Image (cartoon, grey):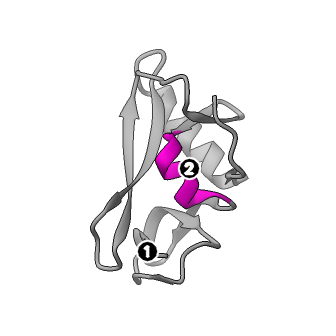
Amino acid sequence: MSEHNVQLSDRAARRIAAILSGEKDATVLRISVSGGGCSGFQYNYDLVTERNDDDTVLERDGAVVLIDPVSAVYMDGSEIDFVDDLIGQSFQIKNPNAVASCGCGTSFSI
């Protein structure tokens, strides 16, 4: 298991735990970074049951998040949060490595 400095906020942990509670056992949230989006890279969110030995694993209050090693490098120092406001509900990643991001917060550039 790789170790990177990625944090999970209380709000994100509660929302992820609520989502996972409605899924079959061993389902977790995988967050990855891929090329694309309006700023160069984008975050992907998938419910999966497969874990890899080199995944970064975040566990908090019933929430389990996996991040693959390549994505973890791009996300090092980030905080995964969940926002519920007038615009809507969404996971947002506060990434100190990003020099620019799109308005919706799903893509970024380094």
Q: Which residues are magenta?
A: 67-76
Mark number, residue 108: 1
Measuring 56% from the left and 46% from the top, which residue is drawn there?
Answer: 15
Name the dominant secondary structure of the magenta segment: helix
- Between 69 and 10, the one lying in front of the other is 69
Q: Secondary structure at mark 2?
A: helix
Vertical side of 34 occupied by 59: above or below: above
- Spot occupied by residue 22 in the image (x, y as percentages of width and height): 44, 27
Which amino acid does the dot numbered 2 rest on?
A: Ala
Q: Position of residue 75 (x, y in %)?
A: 57, 58
The residue shown at (69%, 40%) is 3
Q: Which residue is mark 2?
A: 72
Residue 72 image position (x, y, % from top left)? 56, 50
Considering only order in the chain, which callout, 1 or 2, is on the residue closer to the N terminus?
A: 2
Gap in angstroms between the C-alphas marked 2 and 1:
14 Å
In which quadrant of the rendered image does the N terminus lie? top right
| Residue 58 covered by magenta stretch | no
Q: Position of residue 97 (x, y in %)?
A: 60, 72
Q: Amino acid at mark 1?
A: Phe
Foreground mark, 2 or 1, reads: 2
Number of numbered discs visible in the structure rendering: 2
- The front one of 7 and 96 is 96
Question: Pointer 2: residues within 10 angstroms few (<14), some, or many (20+)?
Answer: many
**Secondary structure under the numbered disc 1 in the rendered image:** strand
Q: Residue at x 41, y 21 (%)?
A: 50
